[in-house]
Structures are given as C-alpha cells and as structure tokens.
Image (cartoon, rainbow, N blue to C red):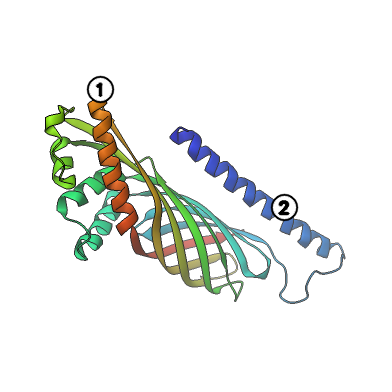
C-alpha cells in the first residue's frame, strides 16, 4: 500500500469514528432536550467540540480536534510535524543514556526529520469539564527523511557497504507506529478557552524504513534491507521517550 493511501485510510477511519461518536451522543442530548427520559441524572450528558493548537515535545507541533463526550470521555484526532530540533532533542536524550552514538543519531535525524505525525487518543476527564485527565493513544510518524551518503550509513551501522559497489547516495525514511499514555490537567480560562498541560510516555511498537537508491539493483536492495533491519531494531529497542504537552484550545 502506498504512503498516501495508507494515510488516507487512517484519516478516513478516524473521521468515521469521530462522526459516529458525534451523532450518537448528539442524539442522546437531543432526546433529553425534547423531554425524553434522561439516561442518567448524574453526571449530566453534554457534548462539545474543541479545536486545539500546540505541541507534544519532543514529538510534534500541530493541531487537533477534541470531542468532549458525556461522563468525561474525550476523543482526540490530530496532525502535526516532527521538526528537526525535536529529533535532535530525542537523539540527545537517548545518547545521554548510552543508547547509541553520534553517527547513529545523525542517521536517525536523516530518517525522521520533518515527518508527518498523525495521532489518535481516547481518554477520561473525571472532573469534566476541566481538571485532571488521562488518555491512551496511537500515533503514526511517516513521510519524513532526506538524502544521505554511504559514509554516514557505514559509520552508523558498522557494516562495510563499499565492497557492494552501491550508489554513493540514498534517501532514508522511517515509518513508526507508537502507543502512548498521558496524564495532565485542563485549565478552563472561560466558557470557551482552555489550556491543556500533560506529561506522557511514547513507545514505538512497530517500525519500517524505506531506503531508496538512484538505481534499482540487487546490491542496492540487499543494502536497503540491511539498513531497514538496523533502524527497525534500534527503534523497537530504544524507541521510548517522555513527552511534555501544551495545547491552547477553543470550545465551540
């Protein structure tokens, strides 16, 4: 499946879930407004939509839609980018604990820089509206990467690739599937505006890498497989980072 069709399927499925939740809970609220029997007297049912902009550092900068549902439940759907300085911070954290060296950090920077980040989160706000909350989520990092040369790849992987007579340059791009856990606090500024602060942990659970040479040869394909395996093992072993989120939102 091509990257564009993969992203489209993720967005379509998420949007469908979003619409189903909206229509379902909106119907419940309408039944109560028209004098129907209330489903529960406590807590009250309400439904609001919020548009937020901000950052989950050092993962992404972007925007998301939040559907606040009855009983403190919420569903988030967002999109953003992973800028190069964020990748640099992640590399610094992992280098600091001895996960890998400088050359591998440079290769990771090449493979992830300016990646598109799509995320889904489902959570609970027991003090709804506002107050403490927690959520579980999934994020997809895709379409990042840029060109690099064989010298960096050899230095990072420790594999002698020159004897294979490869193209001297290649493009490396990584696709990461992550699971996340967040806990934080929602500050209600007034009836419409809010600020959300949260701490989180993000863990890579699956990874694949696209390595593109200028020519399509058997040697290049073997080298691409080696690089893919090296980066995938790296992400799965060390791909866990703490995050700090800040979002400003407007509720409609």
Q: Position of residue 100 (x, y in %)?
A: 20, 57
Q: Quadrant of residue 72?
A: bottom right
Q: Position of residue 118 (x, y in %)?
A: 46, 49
Q: Residue at the location (72% across, 68% down)? A: 45
Quick one: quadrant of the C terminus? bottom right
Q: Quadrant of residue 56?
A: bottom left
Q: Position of residue 204 (x, y in %)?
A: 39, 55
Instruction: State whether residue 103 appears in this view.
Output: yes
Foreground of the two, 25 or 216: 216
Above or below: residue 118 compared with residue 192: above
Q: Is residue 159 left or right of residue 245?
A: left
Gap in Å between the C-alphas at discs 2 and 1?
A: 51 Å
Which secondary structure, mark 2?
Answer: helix
Which secondary structure, mark 1?
Answer: loop
Q: Residue at the location (51% across, 63% down)? A: 136
Q: Label 2: which residue?
A: 23
Q: Label 1: which residue?
A: 215
Q: Mark 2 touching mark 1, by CB under 8 A?
A: no
**Pair 2/1: label in front:** 1
């Amino acid at each position: 499946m091509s990257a564009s069709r993969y992203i489209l399927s993720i967005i379509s499925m998420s949007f469908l879930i979003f619409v189903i939740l909206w229509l379902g809970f909106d119907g419940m609220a309408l039944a109560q407004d028209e004098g129907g029997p209330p489903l529960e007297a406590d807590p009250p049912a309400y439904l609001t939509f919020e548009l937020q902009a901000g950052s989950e550092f050092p993962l992404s900068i972007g925007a998301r839609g939040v559907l606040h549902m009855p009983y403190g439940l919420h569903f988030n759907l967002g999109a953003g980018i992973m800028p190069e300085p964020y990748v640099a911070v992640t590399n610094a954290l992992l280098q600091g604990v001895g996960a890998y060296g400088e050359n591998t950090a440079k290769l990771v920077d090449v493979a992830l820089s300016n990646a598109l980040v799509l995320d889904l989160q489902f959570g609970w706000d027991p003090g709804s509206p506002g107050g403490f909350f927690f959520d579980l989520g999934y994020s997809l990092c895709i379409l990042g990467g840029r060109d690099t040369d064989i010298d960096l790849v050899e230095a990072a992987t420790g594999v002698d690739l020159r004897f294979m007579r490869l193209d001297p340059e290649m493009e490396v791009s990584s696709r990461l599937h992550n699971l996340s856990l967040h806990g934080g606090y929602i500050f209600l500024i007034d009836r419409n505006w809010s600020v959300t602060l949260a701490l989180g942990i993000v863990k890579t659970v699956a990874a694949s890498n696209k390595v593109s040479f200028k020519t399509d040869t058997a040697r290049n394909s073997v080298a691409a497989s080696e690089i893919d395996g090296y980066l995938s093992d790296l992400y799965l072993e060390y791909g866990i980072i703490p995050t700090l989120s800040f979002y400003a939102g407007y509720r409609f």
